[in-house]
Image: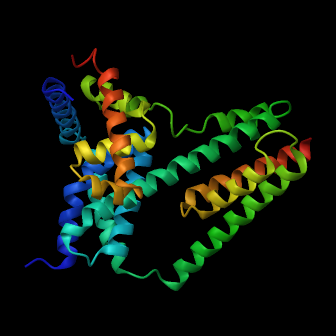
Amino acid sequence: MSQDSNDNESVFLDKVRRTLDDSVDNLDARTLSQLTQARHRALGKAGSKPSLHRRRFWFSLAGLGTAAAVVALAIFLTRAPSGPDRYSAIEDVEILAASENPEFFANMEFYAWLAEEMNDAG
Amino acid sequence: MLDSSQSTERFLASVERRAFRMAQIATNSTDDALDIVQEAMLNLVKRYGARPEEDLKPLFYRILVNSIRDWYRRTRVRNRWRSWLQTIGKADDTEALASIESFPDPAGHNPEDQAIIDDSVAALGTALRTLPPRQQQAFLLRAWEGLSVRETAVAMRCSSGSVKTHYSRAVRTLRKLLEDHWP
C-alpha cells in the first residue's frame, strides 16, 4: 500500500472516530439517564439473589412462554403446507425459547393465541 | 484504592455510551439498543465483576457482540413467523392482520431515533448499517473502540485473521460509500 493511500485511510478513520465521538457526546438527556439507570440496575441486581417468590414467577412465565411456543409449533406442523420448513421451525422455537426476554414470551403467547383463533375460524 | 464494584462501575460508565451507539447502529432501535447494553452490563457484572479493570474491555465487548448476535437471530425468526402468520390470516381476519402489522419493526427506521442524529452521523450510520454484521463489529471495535486485533478476536470469538479480513473489507466498503460525503 502506498504512503498516500495509508495517509488517506488514516484521515478517513480519524473522521469516522470524530463523528462517532460527537454522536455519543451529543446523546440526549433521556438516553443518558436510561444508560445510568441500566448501569445501576446491573450493579444492583448482580449483588442480590432473586427472592424465591420472584424466581417462581419467572419460572412460571418462562414455562408458559415455552408452552405457548410449543402450541404455535404444533399448529404450524399440522396446518401449514407452506412457510418456514419443519426443521427450521423447530430450530426457531429453540432459538426463541432460549431467549430470556419476558417480552418475547408475552408476544409468543399472543401469536399462539392468534394462530389458534385463526385455526378455529378456518 | 477502589474496590471491585467501584472499578466495575467506573469501567461501565466509560464504555456505556459507545456500547449503546454500537448496539443502536446494529439494531437501528434505541429501545433495543438500551436493552442490549443493559443485558451486557448485567452479564459482565455477574460473570466477571471481580476481574481486574484492565481485563473487562474485551470481555464486555464479547458479551455485547453475543447479545447483538442473539438479537439478529431472534429478529430474523420473529419476522419469519410474523410473515407466516400474516399469510395464513390474510383471507379471513383482516383485523388481526392489522394488529400484527402495527407491531414496530425492530429493524425499521424510527423517525424519533433518526431525528437525534445529525447529517454526518446519519450518513455514517447508514453506511455502517449496510455492512454485514461481522464487518460492522470488527470495524467499530478496532477503529472506534481501539481494541487490538487479538482483543477484537476475543470479543468476536473468531481468529485474528478473520478480524483483519472483516476490518479491511469494512474500511474499503465504507470509504467507497462515503466518498461523496467525505471526499
Residue B13 location, quadrant: bottom left
Residue A82 location, quadrant: top right
Q: Where is residue B6 in the image (x, y as percent from the top left)?
A: 18, 73
**Nearer to me, B99 or A35:** A35
Residue B111 location, quadrant: top left
Q: Which residue is drawn at 60% across and 44% down?
A: B76
User: Looking at the image, can residue A112 be seen?
Assistant: no
Give the left or right position of residue B168, taking residue B130 as reference.
Answer: left
When the figure is inspected, residue B176 is found, relative to residue A103, above or below; the finding is above
Q: Where is residue A36 in the image (x, y as percent from the top left)?
A: 26, 58
| Outermost residue to the left | B1
Locate the C terminus of chain B by quadrant.
top left
- Number of numbered tags placed on the structure image: 0
Q: Position of residue B5 (x, y in %)?
A: 22, 75
When the figure is inspected, residue B85 is found, relative to residue A93, above or below; the finding is above
User: Looking at the image, can residue A35 be seen?
Assistant: yes
Locate the N terminus of chain B by quadrant.
bottom left
Q: Which colour scheme is used?
A: rainbow
**Nearer to me, A12 or A38:** A12
**Nearer to me, B7 or B131:** B131
When the figure is inspected, residue A113 is found, relative to residue A7, above or below; the finding is below
Q: Residue at x 54, y 79 (%)?
A: A55
